[in-house]
């Protein structure tokens, strides 16, 4: 440990710490534009200049590179320091007059005008090298570097041309102190929500997630993307989150594992996925970044999103007019014939947000306004009072005009005429559909599915959360489109049924099950593949099939298909059925 004095305070410093690190740990602010805790400091911007007094001699040094030696005295706001920073900020302001970060710092030191005429008023790069060091040291892509000398010095890829080695991680944009770097998004798929900005590799699935912990997206994480380099090298890239995590909770060496559990009930709650509007080309989805889905609008309007909750077009401006088109992919014979149920209400909410935050004209194209739940109709009437224009007629087509405007055409059923309007943004209330792997889940648990792909319940009114498989329950939108209140109620019912099942201790099962006559079994295993409930096992040692009576539902599929006639349905043998028939014809 070393003892030093900063602005009159006696402080302790660990070995290899710099003056800047010690000052920040103790709440002493030293300005800098080129420092990042994950990168080797270079003192490029010189703004962290401080006065160092050592052995009775005083000199100016950069705090980010000067070691916290024992016995030194540091002055962070002395007259020589302020004068030096004033000169530095004047030079930076002359280079980048429109950079807000430099303007704010310059005003603190009394610099309001550039001392020299700026050569390029749009210039933002101060040549601090943060992006270069990030690309080399953290990302290890080694795309960015300095080129040329003197006043012509620039930062960019080789020959200032597009580089195939750039992985588009966006790390350089994050560390840039002046916002001089932008990511080109022209070639990025719109459906992946990328036009709204790069997605963080570390994120919390939802604010109500259980457990409430972040996860790492391996597809977006720089470390995992660089592990398998095209040049054959194994890069130990980034790991910034692991370095900064005080709880030491991040382990990049963890592997997926399969855990086997013995359970008494299973609740299937796989939810839904948003339908891809690319499948209906008339909406021009993907042809303009200002044509977005309702889910993408939720991200755009979120206060924790990339725009801080501001509703902006792709050009960074507030829209003057917005069109919201209902039932995109719902109630449509070319997509999904069912109603997605909650699209009307979230479209009304989004119209309210647009009006409240931008004052833009909002046009709602709808077929039928389905506002059936409690207080929903009142909210619909409130939107009418907010001067939202409701057009009762499906928005049939969206055209991208040469000037970037979007033309929406449709039919106004109330007036009996075609209707068209030019807007700055289009929001598509796209349908929801079952998860892509719903067929695998259905096969795994022996669940039935309707013609629309949703999991089938045992009875729509009497047993809405149960399935035909005992102990397997449904919760939420895996069974069909549901809004939040209905999903909560449905999930609560499923949890209640699971608790009832587990609290019984003993479970009564139906006596109507399949039975194998082992003497007739030919070991063909036909019944194994046909059983929808996986209730039949094959005993290799005895070369016979056996039925698990706890799983069998007595459907009779195996009985009808057994080529050897070894399977029968208990209480439904041929003799029993004939006896029942004979009894019907007997006179009393």
Image (cartoon, rainbow, N blue to C red):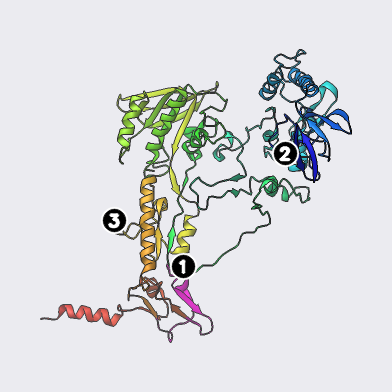
Please state which of residues 295 and 61 is positioned toward the viewer in this rendering: 61
Name the residue beneath numbered marker 1.
263
**Which callout, 3 or 2, points at the residue further toward the start of the chain?**
2
- Residue in view at x 70 percent, y 31 percent: 29
- Residue in view at x 76 percent, y 20 percent: 86
Magenta segment, which residues?
A: 516-544
Compared across the picture, whether 507 is left or right of 208 comes to left
Kindly identify which numbered label has been placed on residue 166: 2
Position of residue 102 measured from the top left corner of the image (x, y, whole percent): 70, 23
Q: Tell me the chief SS of the magenta region.
A: loop
Query: Is 156 included in the stretch rendered in magenta?
Result: no
Please state which of residues 120 and 12 is positioned toward the viewer in this rendering: 12
For numbered disc 1, what is the local secondary structure?
A: loop
Position of residue 405 measured from the top left corner of the image (x, y, whole percent): 51, 23
For numbered disc 2, what is the local secondary structure?
A: loop
Position of residue 145 measured from the top left corner of the image (x, y, whole percent): 80, 33
């Amino acid at each position: 440990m070393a003892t030093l004095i900063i602005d009159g305070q006696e402080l302790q410093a660990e070995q290899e710490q710099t003056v800047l690190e010690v000052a920040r740990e103790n709440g002493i602010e030293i300005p800098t534009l080129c420092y990042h805790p994950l990168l080797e400091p270079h003192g490029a911007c010189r703004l962290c200049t401080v006065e160092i007094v050592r052995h009775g001699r005083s000199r100016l040094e950069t705090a980010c590179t000067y070691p916290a030696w024992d016995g030194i005295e540091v002055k962070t706001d002395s007259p020589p320091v302020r004068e030096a920073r004033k000169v530095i900020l004047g030079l930076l302001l002359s280079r980048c007059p429109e950079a807000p970060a430099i303007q704010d710092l310059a005003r603190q030191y009394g610099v309001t005008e550039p001392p020299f005429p700026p050569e390029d008023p749009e210039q933002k790069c101060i040549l601090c090298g943060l992006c270069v060091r990030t690309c080399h040291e953290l990302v290890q892509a080694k795309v960015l570097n300095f080129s040329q000398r003197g006043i012509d010095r620039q930062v960019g890829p080789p020959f200032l041309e597009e580089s195939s080695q750039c992985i588009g991680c966006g790390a350089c944009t994050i560390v840039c102190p002046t916002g001089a770097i932008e990511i080109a998004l022209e070639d990025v798929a719109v459906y992946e929500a990328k036009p709204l900005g790069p997605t963080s590799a570390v994120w919390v699935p939802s604010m109500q997630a259980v457990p409430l912990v972040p996860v790492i997206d391996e597809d977006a994480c720089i470390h995992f993307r660089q592990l398998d380099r095209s040049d054959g090298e194994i890069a130990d890239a980034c790991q910034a989150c692991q370095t900064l995590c005080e709880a030491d909770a991040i382990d990049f060496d963890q592997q997926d594992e399969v855990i086997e559990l013995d359970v008494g009930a299973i609740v299937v709650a796989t939810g839904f996925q948003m339908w891809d509007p690319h499948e209906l080309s008339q909406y021009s989805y993907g042809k303009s970044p200002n044509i977005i889905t309702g889910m993408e609008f939720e991200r755009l309007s979120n206060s924790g999103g990339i725009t801080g909750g501001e509703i902006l077009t792709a050009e960074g401006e507030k829209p003057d007019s917005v069109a919201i088109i209902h039932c995109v992919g719902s109630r449509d014979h070319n997509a999904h014939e069912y109603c997605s149920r909650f699209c009307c209400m979230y479209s009304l909410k989004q119209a309210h947000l647009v009006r409240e935050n931008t004052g833009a004209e909002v046009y709602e194209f709808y077929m039928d306004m389905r506002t059936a739940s409690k207080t929903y109709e009142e909210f619909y009437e409130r939107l009418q009072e907010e001067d939202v224009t409701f057009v009762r007629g499906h928005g049939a087509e969206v055209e991208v005009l040469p000037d970037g405007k979007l033309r929406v055409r449709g039919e106004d059923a109330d007036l009996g005429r075609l209707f068209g309007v030019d807007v700055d943004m289009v929001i598509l209330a796209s349908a929801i559909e079952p998860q892509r792997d719903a067929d695998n889940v259905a096969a795994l648990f022996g669940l039935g599915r309707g013609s629309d792909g949703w999991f089938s319940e045992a009875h729509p009114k009497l047993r809405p959360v149960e399935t035909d498989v005992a102990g397997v329950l449904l919760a939420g939108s895996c069974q069909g489109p549901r809004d939040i209140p209905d999903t909560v109620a449905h999930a609560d019912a499923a949890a209640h049924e699971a608790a009832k099942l587990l609290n019984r201790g003993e479970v009564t099962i139906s006596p109507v099950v399949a039975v194998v006559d082992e003497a007739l079994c030919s070991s063909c295993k036909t019944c194994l593949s046909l059983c929808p409930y996986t209730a039949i096992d094959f005993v290799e040692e005895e070369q016979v099939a056996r039925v698990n009576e706890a799983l069998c539902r007595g459907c009779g599929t195996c009985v009808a298909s057994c080529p050897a006639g070894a399977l029968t349905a208990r209480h439904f043998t041929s003799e029993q059925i004939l006896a029942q028939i004979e009894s019907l014809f007997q006179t009393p």
